[in-house]
Image (spheres, rainbow, N blue to C red):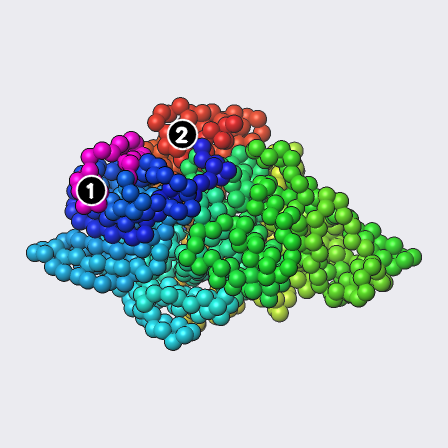
Amino acid sequence: PRVIHLADYQVPDYLIDETHLSFDLHEDHTLVQARLVMRRNPAAGDGLPVLMLDGQDLELLSVVLDGKPFLDYQLDEDHLSLQPNAEAFTLETQVRIHPESNTALEGLYQSGSMFCTQCEAEGFRKITYYLDRPDVMSLFTTKVKGERKRYPVLLSNGNPIAQGEEGSRHWVTWEDPFKKPAYLFALVAGDLWCVEDSFTTCSGRKVALRIYVEPENIDKCQHAMDSLKKSMRWDEEVYGREYDLDIFMIVAVNDFNMGAMENKGLNIFNSSAVLAKAETATDAAHQRVEAIVAHEYFHNWSGNRVTCRDWFQLSLKEGFTVFRDAAFSADMNSATVKRIEDVAFLRTHQFAEDAGPMAHAVRPESFIEISNFYTLTVYEKGSEVVGMLHTLLGPKAFRKGTDLYFERHDGQAVTCDDFVKAMEDSSGLDLTQFKRWYSQAGTPRLAVTGQYDAQTKTYTLNFSQSCPATPGQPEKLPFVIPVALGLLDAQGQELPLHLAGESAPRGGHAVFSIDQAEQSLVFINIPEEPVPSLLRGFSAPIKLSFPYTQDQLLFLMQQDSDGFNRWEAGQQLAVQSLQTMIAQVQRKETPILNQRLIQAYDALLQDTSLDQAMLAEMLNLPAEAYLAEIATVADPLAIHAARQAARQAIAEALFDSLWLRYQHNREVSRQTPYVAESEHFARRALQNAALSYLMLTERPEVLAACLVQFQTADNMTERFAALAALVQSPFEAERETALADFAHEFKDNPLVMDQWFSVQATSPLARALERVQSLMGHSAFTLKNPNKVRALIGAFAGQNHAGFHRVDGAGYRFLADRVIELNGSNPQIAARQLTPLTKWRKYAPERQQQMKAELERILNSGNLSPDVYEVVTKSLA
Ligand code: B3K
Ligand code: ZN
């Protein structure tokens, strides 16, 4: 496979002003006609080079150049090449494709009884010969023809402009008035129902909103529709962005490689990211739907109106859009809890990626398969980079910067540099050094110490930054790290932050740019030794260390006015305690939980003024995956045993407070109809967190309450939490009955069955692998559906650390077998599932050997897709 380098970027030789497509859909093939109105790119130099159109798995039927049949072309695996003889010309091709056998779910494919497309990043070349690159933007019309009975609904981007009948077949022509790259093309045909609503934009235009689903799901669209309207309003209010077409459509499909896709005017969604109603979707699922609907909608400006010049710039649209959707979710729900969740996710998974063989910069330098670069680094770290710009510029200059960016580049395909330039121009800041965040991979370390001088009443913070080597980048230069901080006195009050040499204090909370390898900040007029609250709100995606005492952490946990850092102090205390316990387990001693952590949790449980969602987060011990990420050598079985013991100890010690909180919230839930809003999420989050602790005590009254909640709750959030608690419990009869009842009740709802697979795959009970293997034979399971793969195989390998890492290596073998199988049918999904094996260097030598052996077995299994080849070879390098 070929390596593509950012440094080799060249503007396209030719442009496509107009693209006229015609699809003739049949059960055993589809005919695609394309008429491309093309011309030489004036920016590309002189002469008429050979035109090379991208195309894969296409059966070429005819080529017509300027109205005349044309035979003098060359075909290879990936291209149709020909020599144009004029600056401007019209090229017509006809190809035959086979969506009915497209299992990779890229290009045009069938999902159940419908046709749909997924073109980003390079799927359009599986539909027709084209310049399949994001900097070739064109006006599209699309005619879709199919059998009226099977496919009453025929959709594409833009507005419908014509339709007609031909016997039992019918057709609709769509026109998209906005120029777009091919990756934003979409087509859908099927027997779909739709929920319809409308939105009046800030300038008074009425937009029709339609969510299309298979008939059985028509009752699960309201939440997505509400989320869409909120997103549209929010983008007007917060970013001044108005929607630009007369129709906005969302289609839910069951077989989809990721969450959703922002095709212009016709977003295609994984049904798991659209469908939600109280009885079948949890609070988490509701929040995920809201976030993804917003994310895809926001792409209409950050991605579609202004798109990427090349795929190395992917974070230009993804990092920015994640930043936008996170701010939206923060506004809709609890901002602090949203931040906690995002940071916990980033630190567990993106930091692991940054520390592993696939580490790459937010703007990577090279790739083999672009599909492998839709990563946590590009998305989540990319969002943090935009967030740091927001922090450094402040909200006003940042908004000026986004206005300038949209205005300057509307209708263009641009780069991350263009984005940063708009921020520089709006703020006057020089962001040259800041841009290292785009080019240097790895998670920076910031070691901080504090020194108080009682004589001079000064407090000095000393910062020392470094960044570990990553593949291809042995040395790093200092980053610009915005550190938001406060200095707290003994009462928890913020002291004025007065830097030596400055004329006045900056207030009690301020942001300081740390941009040198070694740097100090000297604060004056500090009357007593303060406790620093550092990196508030997680103001940079780094690993910060400060030698806090336990007393200081407990103090911050109770006193810090920054909610995020209250949580963070609790996490640090818990990490310290858990690390001690892990070492105890490894020495075959009984793991003992730090009493002070228990006391701190007790105090939290007594504090009824604390937001309940926040309390639930604070009671949640650091995840096993996080403990593995921060370990030098991860011992998954010891981590699991220690964390379980800690949970058990907390449950026993705090039984009364947990039980009281549980019973109270359960009673409120029982009396309140389900509402998908923040205070209700919070109540149920605490209720279910308490239940999960309480069940560890194995007391009969808890089991009884859990069973009642499982059997009688009117919503999936409560039912599923009860099921999860039962599945992890030793009550075998109750557990198996609950699982059977649940499967019986929801056997026809694939999304609920995904949850049912996951809850078993992630259960730490013995013989988890055997259970997963036997579930693969369940009638609701199929390897062809990505959601099922993720629910069973992905959940087992990624979240069940004790099961996946069992000592005989059977977990690794199982995963490798599935990857080899999936490589043939769906390379993107196969490559994704590999992630747990890529982390082999984290473990002790024996596990390393076992994991490596499986990677080698995959490598030698023959005929690897570029997707799997890239991940395996980079992992072994
Ligand atoms: N832009 C799409 C991702 C496409 C992934 C292709 N392998 C979804 C999103 O980020 O909104
Ligand atoms: Zn996106």
Residue 303 drawn at (x, y percent)? 43, 55
- Tell me, for residue 290, which label it has, or none: none
Mark 2 neighbour class, 10 Å CA radius: few under 14, some 14 to 19, many 20 or more = few
Q: Foreground residue, 408 or 860?
A: 408
Query: Is 808 located above or below residue 27 in the figure?
Result: above
Q: Is residue 701 left or right of residue 603?
A: left
Q: Is residue 396 visible?
A: yes
| Closer to the camera in the image, 438 or 381 | 438
Coordinates of residue 253 in the picture (x, y in percent)? 30, 53
The crowd level at tag 1 (other Cα within 10 Å; few <14, some 14-19, many 20+) is some
In the drawing, what numbered circle is on residue 1?
A: 2
Task: Residue 273 in the image: state x and y as whole percent.
Answer: 38, 56
Examine the structure image and report whether residue 63 is included in the region drawn in magenta: yes
Residue at the image point whose x is 40% and y is 23% from the top: 860
The image quarter containing residue 49 is top left
Mark 2: secondary structure: loop
Q: Residue flagged by tag 2: what amino acid is it?
A: Pro
Q: What residue range appears in magenta?
A: 62-84
The residue shown at (36%, 73%) is 205
Question: From this viewpoint, which residue is outermost toward the bottom?
Answer: 204
Disc 2 to disc 1, C-alpha distance: 32 Å
Helix, strand or loop at label 1? It is: strand
Say what amino acid the circle numbered 1 marks.
Answer: Val
In this view, the residue in front, 621 or 446, is 446
Q: Which residue is mark 1?
A: 64
